[in-house]
Amino acid sequence: MQLIQICRASWRLEQAIGAAGEERSKTICRGRIGSNYKIEVPRQRSVFPLPGKNNAARAGRCIALLQSVSFAGRKEMWETRRSAALCFGAAYLSSGTAYAIDIYPGDYTVLPAGSNLALMYGGHVRSRRLNVKNAGDVPDSRLQATLGIARYVRYEDIGGIPVVAEAILPFGGYHDVRIGGVSQSTRNGLGDLLLGFAAFPVHKEDPRFGTTLGFTAYLALPTGAYDPAKVSFGTGAYTFTPQIGLIQGLGKGLVLDAAADAAFTVNHMEKGVRYGVKPSYQLQAYLRQSISATATLSFGYSGRFGGAQKIDGLRTGLETSNHQLRLFLGNFFTKTFQVQAVVGGDIASRSGFRQGINSQIRLLKLF
């Protein structure tokens, strides 16, 4: 059984369900899950005890987060293999259960009506630490992925107000995903299609102290490669993300780029199992300095919060919670072609995979 394999390979939950002499294979969850299903824990020696007084309940939550958890129902048996890695929002690419709309410095710049942008993003993400709320770090866990985004942006003007329509398509592949020493199945390919519409009610042309304020609404459609039994690039769910963005000139070539957004994901059913994600939030702020007529250097912070995941109403112990520092370098090699690179990583995170130093490059073509 997959559950036995997982428990033997990672958690070794014997100490979590009781002292010597107590039954070693038993139902450890009650309430909502206990009324419909039972989770069987095989007899194994514990590698480490789970923290807290109510270890049995905590063990139930910890088992629920693992990618393969077998629920033996009264009338049927099926597996809900929803990977813990799905809470992992790639640092600079938005693919996961809780969408974050990362910005690059200058993204809220208003261009003349009729302008078009074609952008291509590419990067590599690596993590060797998985943390679960109320349980701590999961040993021998890691994740690697090569990720990309194709993006198209169109600028127009409606009633004197600049507006933008855009489409974003993530793609890529997970190369190495392990949780508790157990390799996880993956579903690679295209991610969910993201459509966006923005309006800029405040836009002042002053190059030194000008202010630009924009509001964007993003809708992610469940079009990507998705399998609830695998770590997938798609999410199988609709997600609505409103975002507010600001560009504020500070003088002497220094500019503040900032954005805040909230992601709301619609619950969805897969093979009788209900998957849910609580709203998640993101704050971003970068200081951008011109270092030449064509180049800029930016540094700042991105923080994500919320996004707790649930399976049939049971919290998995995973959510969106990380704090990152990022460094950007961009240069226009021609008037219409820019290359921008970013490096960054988590300075603090919990309830998910923690990223080390990761990088991404973006190509932008104006036409």
Image (tube, rainbow, N blue to C red):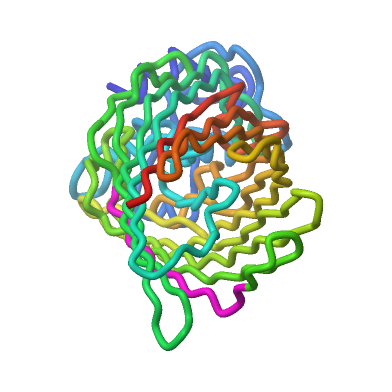
Kindly give the residue lying farthest to the bottom in the view shown: 159
Overall secondary structure of the magenta stretch?
Answer: strand
Snapshot quadrant of residue 261: bottom right
Q: Of 203 and 80, which appears nearest the observer? A: 203
Snapshot quadrant of residue 234: top left
- Check the image and report above or below for 219 versus 151: below
Q: Of 359 and 354, which appears nearest the observer? A: 359
Residue 316 coordinates in the image, percent (x, y): 50, 43
The structure residue drawn at horizontal position 63% and vertical position 40%, both measured from the top left corner, is 293
Asked whether, in this view, residue 252 is left or right of residue 85, the answer is right
The structure residue drawn at horizontal position 40% and vertical position 78%, both measured from the top left corner, is 157
- Check the image and report above or below for 317 versus 205: above
- Check the image and report above or below for 214 versus 276: below
* Residue 54 visible (yes or no): no
- Check the image and report above or below for 292 versus 43: below
* Residue 277 visible (yes or no): yes
Q: Of 112 and 60, which appears nearest the observer? A: 112
The structure residue drawn at horizontal position 69% and vertical position 51%, both measured from the top left corner, is 285
Query: Is residue 201 in the magenta section?
Result: yes
The structure residue drawn at horizontal position 56% and vertical position 26%, both measured from the top left corner, is 130
Asked whether, in this view, residue 303 is left or right of residue 44, the answer is right
Residue 138 coordinates in the image, percent (x, y): 57, 23
Query: Is residue 43 in the magenta section?
Result: no
Residue 361 coordinates in the image, percent (x, y): 46, 30
Considering the image in quadrants, where does the N terminus appear? top left
Q: Of 26 and 277, which appears nearest the observer? A: 277
Residue 335 coordinates in the image, percent (x, y): 45, 44
Q: Which residues are magenta?
A: 192-203
- Number of dots carrying numbers: 0
